[in-house]
Amino acid sequence: MNAVQSVDSVALLPAYLAAGTAVLVLLADLLVARARVTVAVAALGASATAVGAVLVGGGGERRTFCVEAGCSYVFGARAALVAVVVALLTLGVLGLSGPLLRTGTSPVGEYCFLLAASMTGGVVLGAAGDLITLIVALETLTLPLYVLVGLRRGSLASIDAAVTFFVVSVVATTLTLLGAALLYAATGALHVGRLGEAFAERPELLDLPLAATAVALLVLGLAFKVAAVPFHAWAPATYDGAPLPVAAYLSTVSKLGGVVALLAVLRQALPAEVTGPVLALLAVLTMTVGNLVALRQRRTVRLLAWSSVAQAGYILAPLGALAFAAGRTADARAVAYTAAVAYTIFFVVLELAAFAAVVALRPAGADGGTLDDLRGAARWRPWPAAALALALIGLAGLPPGLAGLFAKVTVVRSLLDGGAGWLALVVAVNAVFALAYYLKVTSSLWAAGPGAVAAASPVPGGAAPPAGRGWSVAAVLVAATAVALVIGVAPQLVLDLAAR
């Protein structure tokens, strides 16, 4: 490979489509100034991004921005999978945002532009080949979310959530950048492949305080993005203060971005014998604290937030197994990374289904409310209540939510294959703890009792609330997601793509 940097525009096509969507949304809002047209442009752009990612990723791995040290942008099957999931999640959140945007509490043009800009960061993140591209893509995904969280007019809770999210994210970004800078100082490399080679060729680097500090800072900075304990405190407050569709986006796309970034540096750049013990400890703390605190929650979104914290622990668990002797073989490492990617995909689909059902069950523009507001909900809206129940059962890892069951089996199998049986036991025990609150909420949807329907209904007298114009969009999304869960979201297909 020569020293002249090469550029492959075909590899960049999904990123072009995502960025073009953001520009077209601004033009549509400026020139047409009709909310439906603006949302339609954003939806078409997200769909085109997903199609473009499939076409480019299906043609084999493509590399661009390459120099002698390596390539900064590598678009293959795994990058295509990430791009498709990000685009489809963006499309789903747009569908959920209809009732919110019709209330006028959030400006349509700015809202759709920020979603498209964040989607662009997610698309680029999956293909990042060096630390600079990775961090810039991660921040491109995250920066619009600061504004989206606080974009609801007249809501102090929304502003508080935005400020909390901004302050914590700035700290996380600072740690990540400092870790990347120190890694460059210690190794002279920024491309993830070259970093891995540097540590393999010179194991003595790990004995240097500079390199060890760099690895720790980089991993801890990315742990903030995943909301791993003890870097999780921002998630419940931010999710609960944000508009419901934005909370759905935070708990899915933002979490996916953090996991993808963490996997990128762990898979190729950082030595498993150093990062593995840290990740194993983070996994145990994250799943245990998340599940125990979720047991005491009374607000719907906070429960989902703490649940997502616990789910992050399950995602980190296979990566912690890499510290053990059996986990350092090539096959076991591949199984661990595949399990983490597959579990993340299944989690974000189930989480979006849960938020979609909550949006359908709540009045337009309202927050998630309390768990008592959902008590008896199946009596007046059986289909979205059933979808919420299916999503919660899937997150718990029980049938008929086959996606969640398959995901947990995949994680436990990877831990056993990696020689981390004790960690598999911790995952199993935490899964039992999680059943308590998942099944409690699920059963309350059908609970009978005095005033159950009246407590859940925003209409005086306990009548079923009006569906509203936003109901059809939310219902279609919830129904489609529920069907996908029943068939298991094509689990073997996702696993195959994650392994490539």
Image: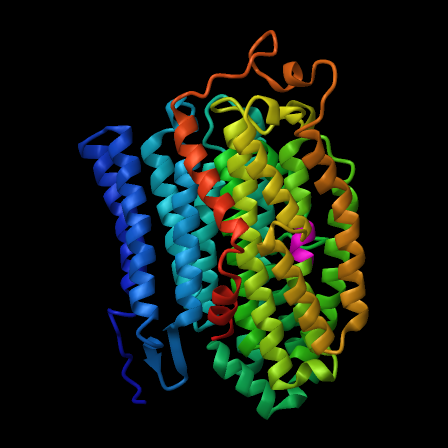
Rendered image coloring scheme: rainbow
- Report the side of 336 relative to 93 (left or right): right
Q: Quadrant of residue 295?
A: top right
Image quadrant holding the N terminus, namely bottom left
Q: Is residue 59 above or below residue 439?
A: below
What residue is at 34 percent from the left and 31 percent from the top? Answer: 108
Coordinates of residue 363 in the picture (x, y in percent): 51, 22
Q: Quadrant of residue 29?
A: top left
Q: Is residue 496 above or below residue 84?
A: below
Q: Is residue 191 above or below residue 447?
A: below
Look at the image and give the residue range highlighted in magenta: 308-313
Coordinates of residue 308 in the picture (x, y in percent): 64, 48
What residue is at 61 percent from the left and 91 percent from the top? Answer: 202
Q: Which residue reaches farthest bottom?
A: 201
Q: Does residue 461 appear in the picture of this structure? A: yes
Q: Is residue 350 above or below residue 246?
A: below
Q: Quadrant of residue 120?
A: bottom left
- Report the side of 187 relative to 40 (left or right): right
Examine the residues drawn in magenta and state their main secondary structure: helix
Q: Is residue 117 magenta?
A: no
Of the pair 409 and 264, the residue shown nearer to us: 409
